[in-house]
Image (tube, rainbow, N blue to C red):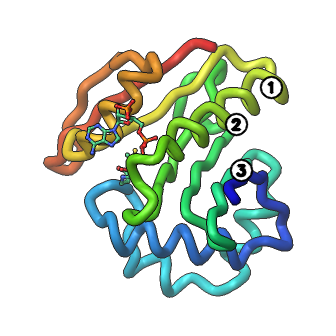
Amino acid sequence: MTKISKLNPTDWKKYKKIRLEALKNEPTAFWASYDEKRLEPDSYWINKMNDVNDTILIEEMDNKVVGLVRVTVNDKEIPPEYAYVGSLYINKEYRGLGISKKLMSAAENYVKQETSLKGIFLEVYKSQESAIMLYNKLGYKIIEKRVKDGVEDLVMVKDL
Ligand SMILES: CC(C)(COP(=O)(O)OP(=O)(O)OC[C@H]1O[C@@H](n2cnc3c(N)ncnc32)[C@H](O)[C@@H]1OP(=O)(O)O)[C@@H](O)C(=O)NCCC(=O)NCCS
């Protein structure tokens, strides 16, 4: 049984578990680090879930959370007409099944239905080749190539 859900604040433990798994297993994929986030108190995770600007979508299979994506609105660091999508992660055992496509589609539907924003803005390290292939396939366009702290990344957008 597979299902995509929007997490509620009371689900903060589910979010903490999959986010820490992602940071631990994919240290080159994200700006945040496992060593830093694993030390955060429970209040950090609870506050994240209560932030009205953040929407956390997860995929559950076999009664466990196997995928995660986060949609953020009102992000001050990106153009105001876009929502930011980040934290995309699928557990290794469940890759290649189309789950990230489903989660990205749910994120896009959320932005279309629940906001009046123009589209989605995301950042991806150049090392994350599978993710770049995914974003290309879904119609995201590279608008900037950057080098941040010696690491190359791409800024991609999609108008919805
Ligand atoms: C990138 C990632 C999210 C893909 O998840 P997934 O559920 O396995 O992807 P899907 O099965 O939905 O595949 C969707 C598309 O992504 C691309 N893709 C996914 N895995 C790929 C791989 N190993 N090689 C090449 N392309 C790949 C393909 O275009 C694929 O479409 P296709 O199957 O029709 O060819 C997953 O590999 C992951 O969690 N990676 C580590 C974390 C990460 O890099 N996150 C992005 C941070 S910005």
| Quadrant the C terminus occupies | top right
In this picture, residue 160 sits left or right of residue 98: right
In the image, what residue occupies the spot 39% across and 22% down? 137
Task: Answer above or below: position of 18 versus 69.
Answer: below
Residue placed furthest toward the front:
1
In front: label 1 or label 2: 1
Say which residue appears at 63% left-offset and 70% top-offset: 62
Element assignment for label 3: strand
Left or right, 155 with respect to 138, comes to left
**Image quadrant of ligand 1?**
top left
> Hey, what amino acid is under mark 1?
Thr
Res. 115 mark = 1
Q: Is residue 56 visible?
A: no
- How packed mark 1 is, by other alpha carbons closer than 10 Å (few <14, some 14-19, many 20 or more), is few
- Disc 3 target residue: 4
Q: Earlier in the sequence, mark 1 or mark 3?
A: 3
Instruction: Tell me the CA gap for discs 2 and 3.
Output: 20 Å
In terms of depth relative to the viewer, which is nearer, 53 or 136? 136
Q: Which label sits in the foreground, 1 or 3?
A: 3
Estimate the spatial distance between the alpha carbons at disc 1 and disc 3, rounded to whole Å. 19 Å
Residue 143, percent from left and from top: 35, 16
Judge the density around disc 3: few (<14), some (14-19), many (≥20) Cα neighbours within 10 Å: some
Which element is circle 2 on?
Answer: loop
- Give the residue at mark 2: 73
- Evaluate if marks 1 and 2 touch, with contact meaning CB atoms under 8 Å apart: yes
Q: Is residue 62 left or right of residue 153?
A: right
